[in-house]
Amino acid sequence: MEQNTLPVEVILSHPRQSLGNIRLDWTPQPGNYLDLEGQTYAVLERHHRYQLKSGRYRLQKIALYVQSATPLTERTCVSGVWVIGDASCRFNARSEILRCAVNPNGPCSRCCDYEKS
C-alpha cells in the first residue's frame, strides 16, 4: 500500500451502485467534485471504513457517496473557499454545494433576479 494515497470506493447514491475503487492523494470532502472516467460527480457523504488488525483499528478505505453533476464553470473564491456562482449577487448562498435559492441550477450570468450586494 502506498503511503500518500487513500483507497476510496466511489458509490453512486441514486440508484445505489458502486462505480469502482480508486486511490486518491487528497481527502475529498462533501461539496467537492470528483472526475472519474470522464464524468463529474459531486461528493455528498464520506464514510471511513476501519479494520481491526493486531489489536488496533486502521483505516481500510473511504467510501464516497456521490451524485452525477455537471462540471462547474462558475466559481468564485470567497475567503479562501471556492463557492458556486457569482458571490457578488445578493442571493448567492456562498456555498460549495448550493448556488442560490432563486436560481440553483444557474447560470448566474443570465439570471433575471441578479442583484449586486
Image: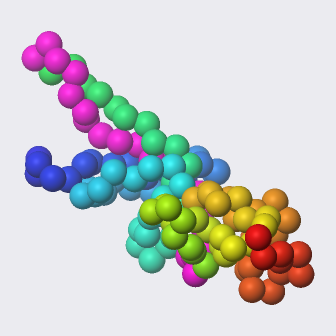
**Residue 73 percent location from the top left of the image:** 58, 81
Q: In this view, does 17 lie to the left or right of 62?
A: right
Residue depicted at 45% across the width and 77% down the height: 38
Q: In this view, does 68 lie to the left or right of 114?
A: left
The span picked out in magenta is: 54-73
Total residue callouts? 0
Magenta stretch secondary structure, dominant: strand
**Residue 80 percent location from the top left of the image:** 45, 63
| Position above or below: 80 against 13 | below
**Screen quadrant of the C terminus:** bottom right
Look at the image and say whether residue 70 sits in the magenta stretch: yes
**Residue 9 percent location from the top left of the image:** 38, 48
Q: In this view, does 77 lie to the left or right of 69?
A: left
Q: In this view, does 53 lie to the left or right of 104?
A: left
Look at the image and say whether residue 1 sits in the magenta stretch: no
User: Which residue in the rendered view is the most extreme toward the right?
Assistant: 112
User: Which residue in the rendered view is the most extreme toward the bottom?
Assistant: 110
Can I make out residue 35 in this image? yes
**Residue 74 percent location from the top left of the image:** 61, 79
Quarter-of-image position of residue 71: bottom right
Quarter-of-image position of residue 20: bottom left
